[in-house]
Image (cartoon, grey):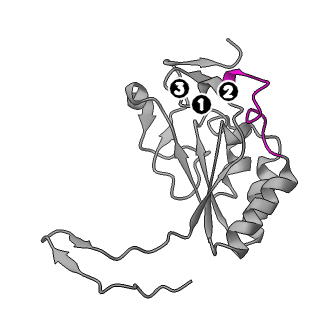
């Protein structure tokens, strides 16, 4: 894979930023691990798959399959980081093993999460200790319940953490409800 552009690079200086026709491949991969989630948010694109236990994409992939996908990201595509998402990755029973494996093979993992499990003092530090970063998906109308201060369960580089006294799911239904 060549990093040399096939056409001449043009740059248009706009003062505070510049436009260019050069495009570089990102070295960040995306790993979609399943459609199982602990919330039922009304705005979710995948609510039908999450609600239907018989949907072929509902369950999480097996750990060996996910490890093979990660290895492909490194060996075939040259990725050095990965976004782990799909349903809610923190409720996947093998999430810590998957995160460890990503680190072992040179993939810096980031979790795309609703933050419910990470906000728990028993689970958050166990998972966050091995992450490069976390990205929390929280309904727009509940952004007021986000604190800029890092919580004890925040991963290094995580700029938004849930306050321990906040309930970010007012527009989402818990899995148990």
Distance between the alpha carbons at the discs numbered 2 and 1: 6 Å
Q: Is residue 35 left or right of residue 17?
A: right
Which comes before the other along the chain, label 3 or label 1? 1
The residue furthest front is 7
Counting from the top left corner in percent of width and height, residue 120 is at 67, 34
Q: Are marks 2 and 1 in contact (CB under 8 Å)?
A: yes
Query: Which segment did they paint magenta?
Result: 50-61
Distance between the alpha carbons at the discs numbered 3 and 1: 28 Å
Identify the residue under disc 2.
50
Task: Tell me the mark number nearer the camera, choosing from 2 and 3.
Answer: 2
Q: Which mark is residue 138?
A: none
Looking at the rendered structure, the secondary structure element under dot 3 is loop
Which comes before the other along the chain, label 2 or label 3? 2
Counting from the top left corner in percent of width and height, residue 58 is at 74, 32
- Identify the residue at horizontal 39%, vertical 30% (top origin): 140
Looking at the rendered structure, the secondary structure element under dot 2 is helix
């Amino acid at each position: 894979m060549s990093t040399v552009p096939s056409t001449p690079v043009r740059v248009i200086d706009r003062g505070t930023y510049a436009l260019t026709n050069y495009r570089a491949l990102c070295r960040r991969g995306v790993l979609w691990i399943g459609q199982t989630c602990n919330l039922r948010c009304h705005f979710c694109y995948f609510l039908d798959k999450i609600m239907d236990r018989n949907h072929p994409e509902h369950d999480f992939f097996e750990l060996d399959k996910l490890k093979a996908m990660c290895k492909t990201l490194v060996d075939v595509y040259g990725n050095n980081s990965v976004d782990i998402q799909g349903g809610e990755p923190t409720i996947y029973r093998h999430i810590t093993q998957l995160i460890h494996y990503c680190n072992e093979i040179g993939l810096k993992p980031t979790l795309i999460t609703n933050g419910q499990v990470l906000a728990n003092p028993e689970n958050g530090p166990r998972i966050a200790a091995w992450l490069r970063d976390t990205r929390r998906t929280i309904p727009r109308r509940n952004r007021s319940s986000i604190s800029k201060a890092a919580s004890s369960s925040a991963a290094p580089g995580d700029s938004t953490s849930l306050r321990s006294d906040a309930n970010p799911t007012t527009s989402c239904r818990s899995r148990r409800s």
